[in-house]
């Protein structure tokens, strides 16, 4: 007759082994789901904000803190006139062509996109991730963005569109950085007169200026 005690130990070992394999598979599945959420969420709020919220539930709390940051505001000249002559699909295509180039550069210099309003981009350096050289990063980013406009215009011309120009304003100052809104709709944002001042500086620029 079989050794019942030995058989029980073998069955227990198999059960534990199956549980371990199942747990490992679930962990892989969970990691993939987390990565998908991070990537999808990061496309709408910014990679830095998405990571901070997913890593810490406190990232969803309302309120903020005062911090010195550098604010970069960019806007296109001539896009409104160009869009008036295009079909809606073409407007989106040209806008995405421009934004794809600019967003890559902003990410390279570790800026956080606070807002994209049409063809205007508001970028923060030094928040939500603090860095000591936020002003230098913003200036380098602005120059790189202007340098990339020649390639953007080449691609626009290849599609039969007119060339565009971009103005950039940069300002360093203290702002309130945090979550604003309500429990149903929240936005991570920078608030304060220095944000408005960056916008006003940009409004005085001509195409090609930083």
Image (cartoon, rainbow, N blue to C red):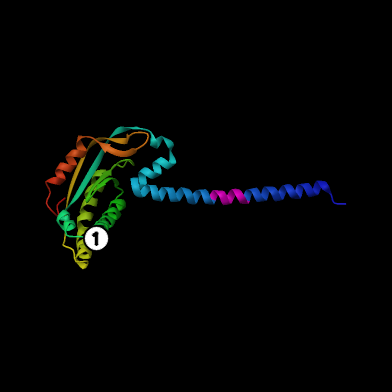
Left or right of 41 in this view: 92: left
Left or right of 148 in this view: 11: right
Q: Please, which residue is most extreme toward the bottom here? A: 158
Left or right of 177 in this view: 33: right
> In the image shown, does 71 or 4 lie closer to the viewer?
4
Residue 131 is situated, as x and y percent measured from the top left of the image, at 31, 42
Q: In percent of the image, x 43 and y 38: which residue is there? A: 56
Q: Please, which residue is most extreme toward the front here? A: 87
Residue 92 is situated, as x and y percent measured from the top left of the image, at 26, 57
Q: Which residue is mark 1?
A: 90
Overall secondary structure of the magenta section: helix
> In the image shown, does 106 or 184 lie closer to the viewer?
184
Residue 24 highlighted magenta (yes or no)? yes
Crowding at dot 1, Cα within 10 Å, few <14 / some 14-19 / many 20+, comes out as some
Quadrant of residue 208 in the image? bottom left
Residue 9 is situated, as x and y percent measured from the top left of the image, at 76, 47
Q: In percent of the image, x 19 and y 35: which residue is there? A: 193
Secondary structure of the residue carrying numbered label 1: helix
Q: In percent of the image, x 14 and y 46: which residue is there? A: 203
Give the magenta part as a residue range.
21-27
Residue 96 is situated, as x and y percent measured from the top left of the image, at 27, 57
Looking at the image, residue 205 lies above or below residue 147: above
Residue 157 highlighted magenta (yes or no)? no
Number of numbered discs on residues: 1
> In the image shown, does 40 or 92 lie closer to the viewer?
92
């Amino acid at each position: 007759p079989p050794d019942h005690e030995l058989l029980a130990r073998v069955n227990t070992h198999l059960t534990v082994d199956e549980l371990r394999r199942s747990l490992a598979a679930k962990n892989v599945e969970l990691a993939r789901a987390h990565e998908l959420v991070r990537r999808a969420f990061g496309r709408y709020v910014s990679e830095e904000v998405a990571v901070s919220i997913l890593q810490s539930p406190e990232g969803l709390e309302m309120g903020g803190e005062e911090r010195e940051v550098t604010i970069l505001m960019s806007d296109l000249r001539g896009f409104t006139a160009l869009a008036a002559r295009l079909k809606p699909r073409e407007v989106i295509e040209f806008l995405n062509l421009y934004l794809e180039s600019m967003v890559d550069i902003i990410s390279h210099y570790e800026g956080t996109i606070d807002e994209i309003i049409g063809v205007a981009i508001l970028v923060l350096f030094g928040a939500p991730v603090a860095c000591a050289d936020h002003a230098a990063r913003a200036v380098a980013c602005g120059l790189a963005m202007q340098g990339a406009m020649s390639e953007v215009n080449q691609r626009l011309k290849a599609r039969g569109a007119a060339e565009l120009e971009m103005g950039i304003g940069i300002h360093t100052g203290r702002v309130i950085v945090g979550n604003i809104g309500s429990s149903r709709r929240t936005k991570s944002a920078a608030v304060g007169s220095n944000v408005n001042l960056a916008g006003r500086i940009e409004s005085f620029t001509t195409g090609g200026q930083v």
